[in-house]
């Protein structure tokens, strides 16, 4: 538990706050405290596909398996999931290894 606030309570509050125009507070709380599945569901149901892409490509690429799993659970179109995965870049450390292949 965080010493200044309860992350679950804050997440629940932000989910109810209808932050479609600027969901950054929700993204930060969910990312920091491991609510990636709920974040993905919120963004998908609110048609924030570009934010899903930005989240996995720029903010937290390591969350991609959780995001994809949640999208599959939500019956997201296969084409969207493929596009999401195709746009992923390998982490900088792996780029040298991939270049040698």
Image (spheres, rainbow, N blue to C red):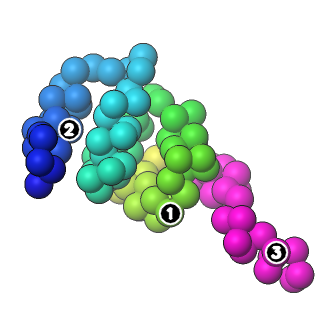
Nearer to us of marks 3 and 1 is 3
Q: Residue at x 61, y 49 (%)?
A: 57
Quarter of image, res 98: bottom right
For the stretch drawn in magenta, what is the main secondary structure? helix
Residue extending farthest top: 21
Nearer to us of marks 2 and 3 is 3
Is residue 18 within the magenta segment?
A: no
Residue placed most toward the observer, 32 or 39: 32
At which x and y percent is residue 25?
33, 31
Q: Which span is picked out in magenta?
A: 77-101
**Viewer can see residue 46:** no
Q: Is residue 95 left or right of residue 73?
A: right
The residue carrying pointer 2 sits among few (fewer than 14), some (14 to 19) or many (20 or more) residues within 10 Å by Cα, namely many
Residue placed most toward the observer, 52 or 29: 29
Q: Residue at x 55, y 57 (%)?
A: 61
Question: Badge 3 is on which residue?
Answer: 96
Residue extending farthest right: 100
Circle 3: element type? helix
At which x and y percent is residue 38?
28, 46
At which x and y percent is residue 8?
14, 45
Q: CA distance from mark 2 to mark 1?
A: 21 Å
Circle 2: element type? helix
Question: Badge 1 is on which residue?
Answer: 62
Question: Badge 2 is on which residue?
Answer: 11
**Viewer can see residue 73:** yes
**Mark sitting earlier along the chain (3/1):** 1
């Amino acid at each position: 538990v965080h010493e200044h606030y309860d992350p679950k309570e804050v997440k629940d509050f932000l989910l109810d706050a209808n932050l479609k125009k600027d969901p950054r507070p929700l993204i930060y709380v969910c990312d920091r405290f491991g609510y990636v599945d709920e974040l993905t569901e919120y963004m998908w149901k609110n048609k924030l596909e570009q934010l899903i892409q930005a989240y996995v490509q720029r903010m937290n690429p390591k969350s991609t398996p959780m995001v994809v799993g949640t999208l599959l659970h939500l019956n997201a179109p296969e084409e969207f999931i493929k596009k999401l995965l195709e746009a992923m870049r390998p982490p900088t450390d792996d780029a040298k290894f991939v270049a040698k292949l």
